[in-house]
Image (cartoon, rainbow, N blue to C red):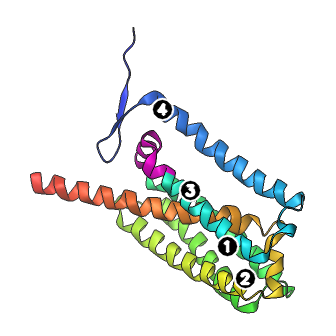
Amino acid sequence: MASNVYIQDSEGAAVPSGEFEYWHWRVFVVLALWAAGVAAATLAGVFETLPMQAVAPLAALGIIAPVVLYKTVPSLGAFLRSRSLDYFTTFHLWRIGAAGLFFWYGSQNLLPETFVRHAAWGDLLAGLLVLPLLFSASKGLRKYVLFHTVGFLDFILAVGTGLYFTIIGDPAMSSIATLPLILIPLFGVSVSGASHIIAFDIMRGRSQGDAAYEQAA
């Protein structure tokens, strides 16, 4: 009878290799179904029946749920902690496309000018920062700390600005509930926010592990 092969994550948790294989495909399937579900709901007119202000709590739920699962499902947490930080960084390339959409909608006066200025330029910067980071020869945590800090600050500014215009009911924000823009708050923003938070937690754990190793040496 074959014995289980265990893989150790960055915090020392040992998880059967079979569970890692399980999460390899499960994460991508869930993300694909999530995006498809948002698109299908939009096409079915679900968001037309909801007030504009409903988008914000739905986006917040999309951030909170993955973080809660990461912290409460041991095998998922171990799998994510075992990944390269590139795993949580490459996804942010989507923000270049989001910036393009914001610029175009803004040029058609379909989004508030202030929102476009805050969200589009910040997303463009965050997305473009991914490329040099991925090809950098540096192996330390510092480059990831820099990227996720810049990306998260942009995230706060863009989401905060969007939330403000949504709460006051600016008519120009109605476009955010239509395709393809709806995929930004209800998929891209949610996954980006969760990936920033999870990456920060993983970097904290790895930096503490490095410090402990240096003290023991």
Q: Amino acid at mark 4?
A: Glu
Counting residues from the start of the chain, the first of labels 1 and 3 encountered is 1
From the image, tell me which residue sits under label 3. 65
User: Distance of mark 4 from mark 2, alpha carbons?
Assistant: 41 Å
Q: In the image as oriented, which residue stretches furthest toward the right?
A: 44
Q: Amino acid at mark 2?
A: Thr
Residue 25, image x, y percentages: 60, 38
Counting residues from the start of the chain, the first of labels 1 and 2 encountered is 1
Quarter of the view holding residue 13: top left
- Left or right: 176 as drawn, with respect to 34: right
- The magenta region covers 69-82
Q: In the image as oriented, which residue stretches furthest toward the bottom?
A: 114
Q: Which mark is residue 19?
A: 4
Nearer mark to the viewer, of 4 and 2: 2
Q: Which mark is residue 56?
A: 1
Query: Which residue is located at x 35 percent, y 67 percent?
Result: 142
Q: Amino acid at mark 1?
A: Ala
User: Distance of mark 3 from mark 2, alpha carbons?
Assistant: 22 Å
Q: Which mark is residue 166?
A: 2
Q: Secondary structure at mark 1?
A: helix
Query: Which residue is located at x 77 percent, y 51 percent?
Result: 36
Nearer mark to the viewer, of 4 and 3: 3
- Quick check: 2 above or below 153? above
Residue 57, image x, y percentages: 65, 69
Counting residues from the start of the chain, the first of labels 4 and 2 encountered is 4
Contact, CB < 8 Å: mark 1 with mark 2? yes
Q: Please tell me whether the stretch drawn in magenta is mainly helix, strand or loop.
A: helix
Contact, CB < 8 Å: mark 4 with mark 3? no
